[in-house]
């Protein structure tokens, strides 16, 4: 299981999913929280072949950091407000013969 990250439900020792990166595993945990309360984090561990990586407070912090990162990315995206969502692909040019 080279480069494999697992999300484990510790209460019944079930592997809920395997992922190529730790970030993907944290994304999955965040998805689980959309249908479970935050107390569910106490039952989850992200581990790889070396053992547990994120659990309890460290897992909570990773999920918070993920959300903060997404909020920062959304805030830095250019807004199309005032253009009705239309993004003009090229600069507008005056029609030929139109007086300047």
Image: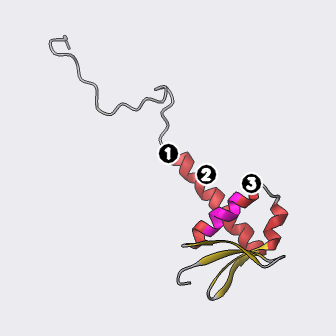
Query: Of callouts 3 and 1, which one flags the residue occurring earlier in the amino acid sequence?
Result: 3
Callout 1: SS = loop
Q: Nearer the viewer, mark 3 or mark 1?
A: 3
The magenta-colored residue range is 25-31
How far across and down, in percent of the image, does residue 85 sit?
Answer: 48, 30
Residue located at (36% from left, 30% from top): 88
Location of residue 76 with respect to 14 vertically, above or below: above
Q: Which residue is mark 1?
A: 77
Looking at the image, which residue sits at the far bottom? 50
**Which residue does the numbered mark 3 point to in the structure image?**
34
In the displayed orientation, state which residue is furthest to the left: 97
Mark 2–mark 3 contact, CB under 8 Å? no
Q: Which mark is residue 71?
A: 2
Q: Is residue 77 above or below residue 100?
A: below
Nearer to us in this view, 27 or 100: 27
Say the numbered circle drawn on residue 61: none
Between circles 2 and 3, the one closer to the viewer is 3
Q: CA distance from mark 3 to mark 1?
A: 24 Å
Left/right of residue 91 with respect to residue 19 in the rendered view:
left
Label 2 to label 1, Cα distance in Å? 10 Å
The answer to which of marks 2 and 1 sits earlier in the sequence is: 2
Asked if the residue at tag 1 contacts the one at tag 2, i.e. Cβ–Cβ closer than 8 Å, the answer is no
Label 2 vs 3, first from the N-terminus = 3
Q: How far is disc 2 from disc 3 in space, using C-alphas?
A: 17 Å
Note whether 96 is above or below 79 in the view shown: above
The overriding secondary structure of the stretch rendered in magenta is helix
Residue at 63 percent of width and 89 percent of height: 50
């Amino acid at each position: 299981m080279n480069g494999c990250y697992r999300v484990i439900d510790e209460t019944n020792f079930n592997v809920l999913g395997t992922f190529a990166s730790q970030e993907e595993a944290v994304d999955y945990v965040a998805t689980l929280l959309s249908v479970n309360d935050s107390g569910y984090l106490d039952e989850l561990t992200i581990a790889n072949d070396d053992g547990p990586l994120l659990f309890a407070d460290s897992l909570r912090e990773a999920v918070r950091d993920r959300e903060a990162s997404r909020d920062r990315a959304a805030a830095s995206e250019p807004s199309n407000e005032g253009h009705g969502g239309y993004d003009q692909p090229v600069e507008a040019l005056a029609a030929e013969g139109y007086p300047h």
